[in-house]
Amino acid sequence: MRNIAAITAFFLLAFNLLIPSQSTAAPSLWQSKVDPWVLQTAAQGETEFLVFLQQQADLSGAEALKTKQEKGTYVFEQLTQTAARTQGPLLAALEEMGIDHRSFWIANMIWVRGGAQAVHTLSLRRDVAHIYANPQVRLQEPFLTPALPTFPQTTDAVEWNIAKVNAPQLWSLGFTGQGAVIAGQDTGYDWEHPALKNQYRGWDGNNADHNYNWHDAIHISSNTDCPPDRQKPCDDYGHGTHTMGTMLGDDGNTNKIGMAPGARWVGCRNMDEGFGTPSTYSECYQWFLAPTDLNDNNPRSDLAPDVINNSWGCPTYEGCTDPNVLLTVVENVRLAGILTVHSAGNYGSQGCFSVRDPAAIYDASFTVGATDSIDVIAGFSSRGPVSVDGSYRLKPDVSAPGVNIRSCVPGNGYASMQGTSMAAPHVAGLVALLISAYPQLAGQVDALENMLKFSALPRTTEQTCGDVSGLGIPNNTYGFGRIDAYAAYNWLHSAYIPLVQSIP
């Protein structure tokens, strides 16, 4: 949309006119700590940004811990203690400057709204490592399938995509996701939809309790359908409800739309009418690591979910010029024993190197491409390798159905959509199925990811992306292949059982 690199120099001139002449730091030094988008927008007035502190929590001890509870407690304590110990002077300075701010601990950072003077002053501080952009980022919308209606409808069979990945075979063995908790951060959720209500952790069959089960990261909005700081789940866009349906939706009748109907779900709204920011994404990640009550108090890491579905991205053309803006956040969540699933993106028409948006690009994210009903990669599904951060890592990790996926939408309805947003929820649901089969797998992110990859149906292509042949496995089109729930269970049961038995 804008060539940020080309216009940054122009705005730097205007920006410098607003900075006091007595500054003792060379402009090149302080400006190197600030994202170009921040420099540009601050030159025009107030802007939003994330102040990332030099000192970050040392979480190296997490990998030696065995259970999800141990990992979650350790990571939560280390993160909160580091933030409490180091943020005081910076918070005091922000108070003295009289500018809006909000403290985070999921990474040691602070959200700030301020102008050119604030950016300059903060960048000169020795305890500040970097100032990241916090633009509004519009959700890359899935494609509504026009041939299918959006009003309530029923089907006499399990949806094709659920059957395709062999989820019903695990149901027949008694594994439906029971005991597992799935989380989603998205446009929100219609929690009272018949396909979702009974699976919501905040519903006991008679009463609703949204404490520890729902969080709204939207604090300022003119939205009347979903006002800010909503105390119960809502979805003003439909995207979140649709993705949650694919994870675990089942109305107990004929609408069998979800992978793990026996699992429970919790949710966080990270987008306002389709617009999110790095800070709203980070806030949801923070809440998932230690859910709180509706007043955002009394965090409990023991109520953290097993897996998080993320069907959103942060494109560079919207101002996320530093691809590492969410890297520490995602890595910290993973160290807490939570698997984070990400849609690869819908830029496949642009060919190779089109997996390009945080957080799908990270090694700590489990990234999913989209296939159709005959296991062919969708034309819109983004391909790897990842080049935006210079890593050239292989992506996606796996693929799943993402074309013409029927699921629930707000208002008790159903609709078909397509996009990698529709593919990723299959993987989140499969994680829940595997944990219901082997509860010891909860918190074992490496083991779960390996099972998902090595049990996938191999898929190849003539397309070669980067220096990885499309004829080999894995490749940058399908990853390790299309997921298969029954194969994952069998692979685990036969080849991986010694490891599982060794997990307390």
Image (spheres, rainbow, N blue to C red):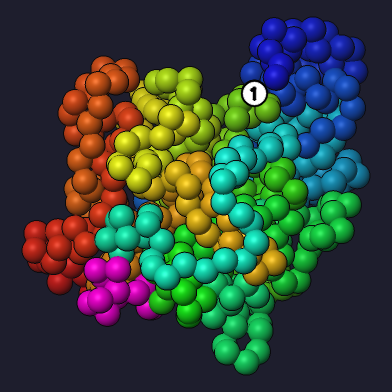
Please state the horizontal and vertical placement of residue 113, each as a whole percent of the image.
82, 40
Q: Is residue 168 left or right of residue 131?
A: left
Q: Quadrant of the N terminus?
A: top right
Is 180 inside the magenta-drawn segment?
Answer: yes
Query: At numbered mark 1, what does the secondary structure look like: helix, strand or loop?
Result: helix
User: In front here: 211 or 131?
Assistant: 211
Q: Quadrant of the C terminus?
A: bottom left
User: In front here: 226 or 33?
Assistant: 226
What kind of residue is marked 1? Tyr
Q: Residue at x 79, y 60 (%)?
A: 226
Q: Residue at x 47, y 60 (%)?
A: 246
Q: Residues within 10 Å of mark 1 (few under 14, many from 20)?
A: few
Is 151 inside the magenta-drawn segment?
Answer: no
Residue 295 visible (yes or no): yes
Residue 65 visible (yes or no): no
Q: Residue at x 36, y 25 (%)?
A: 385
User: In front here: 176 or 58?
Assistant: 176
Asked which quadrant contains residue 115, the reply is top right
22 over 461 or under it: above or below: above
Residue that label 1 marks: 317
Asked which quadrant contains residue 206, the reply is bottom right
User: In front here: 322 or 162?
Assistant: 162
124 over 140 or under it: above or below: above
Q: Residue at x 65, y 89 (%)?
A: 207
Q: Is residue 318 left or right of residue 171?
A: right
Please state the horizontal and vertical placement of residue 211, each as a whole percent of the image.
66, 77
Please state the horizontal and vertical placement of residue 26, each as a whole percent of the image.
72, 12
Q: Which residues are magenta?
A: 168-185
